[in-house]
Image (cartoon, rainbow, N blue to C red):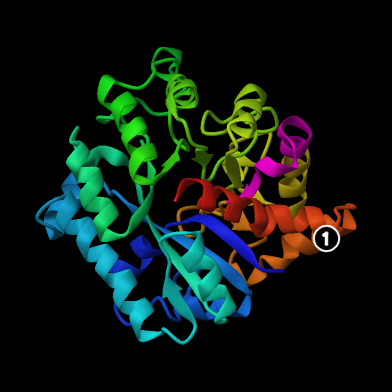
Amino acid sequence: MKYIDFHCDTLLKIIDEKGQSLYSNTVASVDFKRLKKAEAMAQFFAIFLIDKDTLEEKFDSDDDYIKKLAKILKDEVAKNNDIISMAYNAEDLIKNYASGKVSAFLTIEDGRSVDGKLEKLDEYYDLGIRLLTLTWNYENCFGYPNSEDLDIMNKGLKPFGKEAVEYMNHIGMIIDVSHLSDGGFYDVAKISKKPFIASHSNSRELSPHPRNLTDDMIKILAQKGGVMGLNFAPQFLNEDISLKDSKVELMVKHLNHIKNVGGEDVLALGSDFDGIGGNLEINSSDKMYLLFDALKKYGWSERLIEKLAYKNAIRVIGDIL
């Protein structure tokens, strides 16, 4: 079953590992070789903004770091162009697949480097960035993060964040609300004229982590034409968020709940590979079939699995990019 995964942190794993590559490696859950074996249609590669102190030990600035990680991905894709190509829109995605190639999309996780300047979004777009996760776990120019502190959780987007949502709609960049505060989510839903996504978030009803979405959010996301990518992290799957086991059975439970609340068009995948730990039943991109096989056993039709795996994602990519 071909699939599209909206989020992995593999670039962060590779950058400090000598002798490892994006084509094939022993330190990460994702590489080009395994993506091809798994019949992946597309992988979204996140440039995760590491903490400032660590970053400044090796890089001149956030932008220096972003450009260097983007270059690593593009260079490795160019070396392996027989099996993978960069993609910047739905047309590229379809063209690459027709040529037997996986598509690689570039994203940024944490908009802190935008620094309140709309022209930075233009620069990142020109660099090839097609998705921006507005916040990570800290306040930035867009707004506030998910939090157990209700005062923070209820805060909405800052004035720049509201302006940036409209601008991202205009230039064609995917707005990602995973990690955003609840107040920020509702502001995005109110302001955005295009669909938006939660690239790697699950159901808060089943797993009460603030990173997950409430049923009300799932319904609104679906009404806006967006999708939410199933996250494989144990703390976003289990009812007890301290547990360390990520099981396919839990994934199926979340997907059934999300489908029942938001409908089948909101379903997507966002593994969070290489950004998560624990005892992962699916710990590599070439084991994605385990989820699809389980869904068949639980009575999911081929048509419904295809919507989860890639069809909903293609629709959203086409609507936004």
Q: Is residue 136 above or below residue 16?
A: above
**Looking at the magenta stretch, what is its main secondary structure?**
helix
Residue drawn 44% across and 15% down?
154
Asked if residue 260 is among those painted magenta in the image, a careful observer would answer yes
Asked if residue 108 is among those painted magenta in the image, a careful observer would answer no
Residue drawn 76% across and 36% down?
257
Task: Using residue 222 as the reference point, say whether residue 35 is left or right of it.
Answer: left
Q: Is residue 253 above or below residue 247?
A: above
Amino acid type of the residue tagged 1 in the rendering: Glu
Task: Using residue 40 as the reference point, say whether residue 181 is left or right of it.
Answer: left
- Residue 159 in picture, x, y percent from top left: 27, 20
Residue drawn 66% across and 65% down?
288
| Residue nearest the viewer, comparing 315 with 205 | 315
Residue at which label 1 appears: 302
| Residue nearest the viewer, comparing 109 with 284 | 109
Position of the N terminus by quadrant: bottom right
How many numbered circles does the render carry? Answer: 1
**Residues in magenta, as a range:** 257-269
- Residue 141 in picture, x, y percent from top left: 25, 29
Task: Using residue 114 as the reference point, say whether residue 270 is left or right of it.
Answer: right
- Residue 296 in picture, x, y percent from top left: 85, 59
- Residue 215 in picture, x, y percent from top left: 67, 25
Residue 168 makes an appearance in the image:
yes
Q: Residues within 10 Å of mark 1 (few under 14, many from 20)?
A: few
Q: Which of the 4 quarters of the picture holds residue 221?
A: top right
Residue farthest to the left, as pictured: 60
Residue farthest to the top, as pictured: 151
Residue 232 makes an appearance in the image:
no
